[in-house]
Amino acid sequence: MVIETERLLLREFTHEDFPALFEIVSDPETMRHYPQPFDENRTKDWIEWNLQNYKEHGFGLWAVVLKETGEFTGDCGLTIQIIDGESLPEIGYHIHKNYWRKGFGSEAASAVRDWAFMNTEYDCLYSYMKYANIGSYSTAIAIGMRKVKEYPDEKNGISYAYAIKREEWEKLKW
Ligand SMILES: CC(C)(COP(=O)(O)OP(=O)(O)OC[C@H]1O[C@@H](n2cnc3c(N)ncnc32)[C@H](O)[C@@H]1OP(=O)(O)O)[C@@H](O)C(=O)NCCC(=O)NCCS
């Protein structure tokens, strides 16, 4: 287990998470801001990529589990992403649509933000998304990020980058 919040546990993925993760990332509504929903192979690769990230960086996307029921409700964590040509630390999130708009995305993402500032040397954390992904950028805003970039992107047409600096986070927290 990596992080505990009021309602959630964030822990490393295992191969046993495949069916629960696949239910989320294969859903067309959940993945409507992606080129396409994930198929089985893409989902398996997603788990493998994160297992590799834990080894390589000590972080990755983690499984988000409801404390009360033990239910797998999504993923949230830190990965290195190419944002407008730069490799940057990014907070990412996917929550099962049955649980949207209940504060779980921002609860998980703010815990990841705190973890990252406390356990890594990064001085700025990012989230990036397709311009139309209002749920995603609203979550970035909810954890104290502000828009720092808008740029043309092959995958998204236009991408937005949101960010929070360490000094902004320090003011936010203490
Ligand atoms: C983005 C996502 C993880 C947000 O999860 P969530 O649990 O619904 O988020 P929260 O309930 O914590 O909401 C965070 C903020 O975003 C707002 N929000 C969330 N979804 C929204 C939507 N569809 N439209 C408008 N605002 C939205 C909430 O109102 C809240 O704002 P507030 O703090 O001002 O109240 C979820 O929508 C999701 O899984 N989307 C599909 C996957 C995806 O696109 N991930 C991002 C890839 S870049």
Image: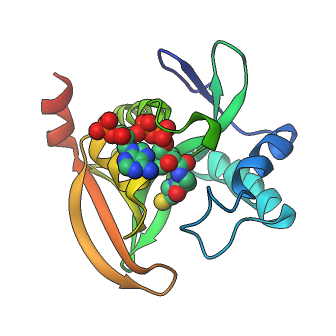
Q: Quadrant of the C terminus?
A: top left
Which picture quadrant has residue 99?
top right
Instruction: Report the front residue among 134 and 170.
Output: 134
- 121 sits to left or right of 26: left
Instruction: Report the front residue among 57 and 69.
Output: 69
Is residue 93 among what the camera can see? no
**Residue 1's spot in the image, x, y percent?**
64, 23
* Residue in the picture at 37% in, 74% down: 159
Which picture quadrant has residue 13?
top right
**Residue 65's spot in the image, x, y percent?**
65, 27
- 126 sits to left or right of 145: right
| Ligand 1's quadrant | top left
- 44 sits to left or right of 78: right
* Residue in the picture at 40% in, 68% down: 132
* Residue in the picture at 24% in, 71% down: 149
Tell me if residue 100 comes above or below residue 56 in the rendering. Answer: above
**Residue 135's spot in the image, x, y percent?**
42, 52
How many numbered tags mark residues here?
0
Q: How is the image coloured?
A: rainbow
Instruction: Report the front residue among 14 and 133.
Output: 133
Tell me if residue 69 comes above or below residue 166 in the rendering. Answer: above
Instruction: Report the front residue among 32 and 84.
Output: 32
Which picture quadrant has residue 29?
bottom right
**Residue 106's spot in the image, x, y percent?**
41, 36
* Residue in the picture at 21% in, 37% down: 169
Tell me if residue 142 comes above or below residue 127 in the rendering. Answer: above
Is residue 48 among what the camera can see? yes
